[in-house]
Image (cartoon, helix red, strand yellow):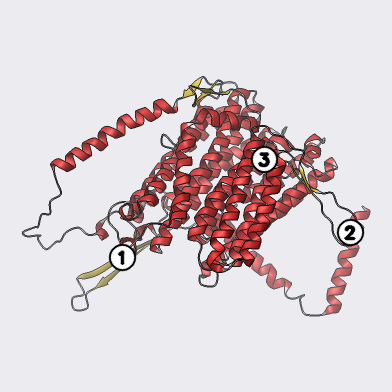
Amino acid sequence: MDLVDAGLLAQLVLGALAVAAAVAVPARLRNLLAGALVFAAGVAAAVTGTAALLGAVGAGLQIPVALPLAAPLEPLLLAPDELGGLFMALAGVVVALAALFGIGYAHGPAASRTGWTAFAVFAVGMQLVPAAADAVTFLLAWELMAGGSTVLLLADHASRAQVRRATIWYAVMTHLSFLFLLAGFGVLAAVTGGTSWATMAGGDVAAPAATVAFVLLFAGFATKAGLLPVHVWLPRAHPEAPSHMSAAMSAAMVKMGVYGILLLTLRLLPDGPRWWAIVLVALGAGSALYGILHASVQADLKKLLAYSTTENVGLITTAIGVGLLLRDSGQFAVADVALVAALLLAVSHAAFKSVLFLGAGSVLHATGERDLDLLGGLAARMPWTSISFGVGALGAAALPVTSGFVAEWALLQSLIHVDARADRVLAIVIPITMGVVALTVGLGLLTFVKAYGIGFLARPRTPAAAGAHEAGPAMRAALVLGAVLVVGLGLVPGPLSQALAGAVSAGGVSTTGGAGLLLDAVDVVLNPVALTLLTLAILVPLVALNGVLARRHPRRDVELAWGCGGERTSPRMEYNATSYSEPLVRVFRSSLQASQLVDVVHHEDAPLLVEQTAFTQETGDVIEDRLYVPATRWAGRVGDLARTVQNGSIHRYIGFSFVAFVLVLVLVAL
């Protein structure tokens, strides 16, 4: 048995042991043992996936399947290729970080037998999705991932009504995704005569069938990835899940949707028409801008990060669409840069979003708050969390020297070097895409300056923030490892990009100077050493100057002799998340569905004098309001009509079944 097959078997065994530990181990040891086993399963997936990415090919791990009173079934087959290996490694790293954090974080229902069992099933299912070599195995692993995440999302349903609502949204959307995938793979299997990827990819699929399969499969994968307009579950589910689960869902689970899009467009149906690529670019760019715009005005830290996930997945999809569009136009070298940029964006997002969600969980654990308006001053009280979250924010804002900078730099290089002179479609699509990406990057910087500055700097705005405490050892270890990953990947863009290029059969990517990235197709070099030295040359003098000035001008308390009726500034006078984003709300009010309420309380004895003023601002999701609310209303009406035939009569139900049976026979006969 080779390394890849042994790694696959190890994941299954460790997952089973984690479930056994979750069920059998006493509560006082459950977090440690179950968490350690899930952590080990994640490490096994990371090693196995990396081996597959670097070209290690196994015979494949076959899992026999037998059902009572049924004919023998084909065994399930796990055999990751380079692309699958990349996403398995990505999922494994995220699962390992989330499990390590969960050892110290999980409490209440999330630390119960059900909680850890669900997390183990979710983790192993997610790691096996990219290892599947056929549609049946893929859908089974997909449902394990969906079922485990749904159960764990319900952890706090008994005490919080919003958790129940979020779970309903998530369950409906995730099963809708499954139905789309089942139908799409069914179309391909019927046309090609098999369910394996090799059979589907080698079959002759006519254009109408290919279009139907593409639409169904892309809808299923886009739903899981959180693209517009099927993103509505994401800002509901991520904030309500336990934070280690939120990190795994955002950083890894949505990437299974991205993996599916790449599997569909690069392997199963690689010769699709041009409009497929245009759809990817349009939905990707729209999702990126819409997601970051909503993220920029959120005061709820976890909801901000959830909308940011829609933005990041949108950028990844945009890069995939640009790569496909350029391949169709014959610009293969620049197309390869775009596809490598898509993978860099996926890896980068997995790294920094893990840190950000785990950091948000640490803040929630320490303060009981996730509202940025009620935080502040955490940098002095939670230094490990503050530094780690800050590094993650730098990566999310695509600043040097982080993985986020490398990924978005590569995407912009692919857009800048497109030759659109002889192609009208490119002449229209590429400039618009560049503008949307540039605006998205700018709003991303604003968003994470707000998230870090309002949440961690200044003075505490509530007693909960003032009494915050640092996270425990396991939680700190996960945060630090994630932060190191964000910076480490940014310092080795060359070797990283070369490894990723093999997953999409891309050329023109090489390493220079040991760690630098050379894009041969566009003749551009990214040197992380020079970039790091330049960054240090800017920051070190500023820090030194600040220290000198602090020594020369020590802090002094000055009392006002007469304040003209005023007083010293208080934390209430600081900028908060709501006030910081108010200009954006004013400009994009219609898109954000913004509503504002000013509540003024007057003195009882002097009605003309104001005693207290309260300002409340809420934003809504225009797609949810215009699309999903009417749809659910109509679904309710259909359900009410259906009750008229649900009268409890067994004879009527048998009659319905007979009519349905006859209709099926007629359809089969046709």
Name the residue tied to disc 3: 84
Q: Do the CB atoms of the residues marked 3 and 1 lie less than 8 Å apart?
A: no
For the view shown, which residue lies furthest in the right direction? 669
Name the residue tied to disc 1: 463
Q: Is residue 543 above or below residue 506?
A: below
The residue tagged with tag 3: helix, strand or loop?
helix
Residue 599: quadrant of the picture: bottom left
Q: CA distance from mark 1 to mark 2?
A: 64 Å
Q: Do the CB atoms of the residues marked 2 and 3 lie less than 8 Å apart?
A: no
Residue 305 seen from this side: yes
Q: Residue at x 28, y 53 (%)?
A: 458
| Residue 79 in the image, given as x and y percentages of width and height | 73, 41
Q: Nearer the viewer, residue 602 or 373?
A: 373
Quadrant of the image containing the N terminus: top right
Quick check: 17 left or right of 137?
left
Q: Is residue 53 above or below residue 250?
A: above
The residue tagged with tag 2: helix, strand or loop?
loop
> Label 3 crowding class (10 Å Cα cut-off): few <14, some 14-19, many 20+?
many
Q: Identity of the amino acid at label 3? A: Gly
| Residue 431 in the image, given as x and y percentages of width and height | 51, 31
| Residue 367 in the image, given as x and y percentages of width and height | 38, 62
Name the residue tied to disc 2: 70
Q: Residue at x 15, y 61 (%)?
A: 567
